[in-house]
């Protein structure tokens, strides 16, 4: 009896860890390059252990064959990857906004090694992503991310058939929504940049001998940095509200 109970608890623990651990690989903040792999593993193990008593009673019994076990574990890994990717795509809206703003302000070549996106990106994108991660953790919204992962067991019951088609549709829809949000957040920079280039073109026509690009680039960067300072609060507020409402789809 004791051996069967131990086998059941070990199976339930690793089944839960498969989903939560995979989600940790993609969750914003937890998946950043500066977060130690051991720390990420420890957080996933701790959360799996904490939610084990609550979720164990709703989990299926251990399968009789290795193939069924591998199939069940693979399904849990897929669900964890889906939830983590959705949240990763949500925050990519700021990367889109920062890239467009950098192009509009002639700062696209000012690249930094972005630890959040784990790649090179523009300075504005890196600043926006880092600020977003700080706000997410300061406002305790990372609890909402972890809650969404745990409550996914209500939406995607272990052992049941996975809606693969719905997964693909949800990811595609989230990519479109994130791109649209990034475009909206960068709209002030596009408007200012377009207006500035029109004015620069008129000056060039009126004064052909004037080297417009000699003084035009510093003025453009200065104006766009001032615009960035003015709109930063609104950009982050709009993103946080959108991020919270998007996470609400996974929280009961």
Image: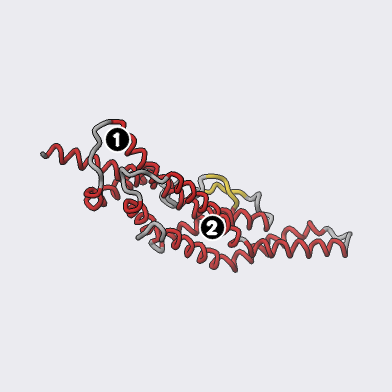
- Residue 45 placement, left or right of 6: right
Figure coloring: secondary structure
Report the front residue among 215 and 227.
227
Q: Which quadrant holds the C terminus?
A: bottom left
> Circle 2 is placed at which residue position?
128
- Residue 94 placement, left or right of 10: right
Quarter of the figure with residue 205: bottom right
Disc 2 secondary structure class: helix
Crowding near pointer 1: few (<14 within 10 Å), some, many (20+)?
Answer: some
Residue lying at 37% horizontally and 41% vertically, measured from the top left: 77
Residue 102 in the image, given as x and y percentages of width and height: 64, 55
Figure check: 130 above or below 42: below
> Circle 1 is placed at which residue position?
69
Disc 1 secondary structure class: helix
- Residue 94 placement, left or right of 86: right
Residue 216 in the image, given as x and y percentages of width and height: 76, 60
């Amino acid at each position: 009896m004791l051996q069967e109970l131990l086998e059941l608890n070990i199976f339930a623990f690793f089944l839960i860890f498969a989903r939560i651990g995979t989600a940790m690989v993609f969750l914003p903040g937890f998946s950043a390059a500066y977060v130690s792999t051991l720390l990420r593993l420890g957080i996933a193990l701790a959360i799996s252990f904490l939610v084990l008593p609550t979720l164990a009673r709703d989990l299926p019994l251990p399968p009789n064959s290795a193939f069924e076990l591998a199939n069940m574990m693979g399904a849990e890994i897929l669900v964890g990857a889906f939830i983590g990717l959705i949240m990763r795509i949500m925050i990519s809206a700021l990367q889109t906004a920062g890239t467009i703003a950098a192009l509009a302000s002639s700062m696209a070549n000012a690249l930094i090694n972005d630890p959040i996106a784990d790649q090179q990106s523009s300075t504005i994108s890196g600043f926006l992503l880092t600020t977003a991660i700080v706000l997410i953790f300061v406002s305790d919204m990372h609890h909402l991310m972890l809650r969404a992962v745990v409550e996914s067991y209500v939406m995607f019951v272990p052992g049941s058939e996975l809606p693969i088609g719905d997964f693909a549709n949800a990811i595609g829809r989230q990519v479109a929504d994130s791109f649209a949000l990034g475009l909206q957040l960068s709209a002030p920079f596009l408007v200012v940049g377009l207006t500035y280039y029109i004015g620069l073109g008129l000056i060039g026509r009126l004064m052909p001998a004037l080297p417009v690009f000699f003084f035009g680039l510093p003025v453009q960067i200065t104006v766009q940095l001032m615009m960035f300072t003015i709109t930063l609060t609104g950009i982050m507020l709009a993103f946080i509200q959108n991020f919270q409402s998007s996470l609400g789809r996974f929280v009961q």
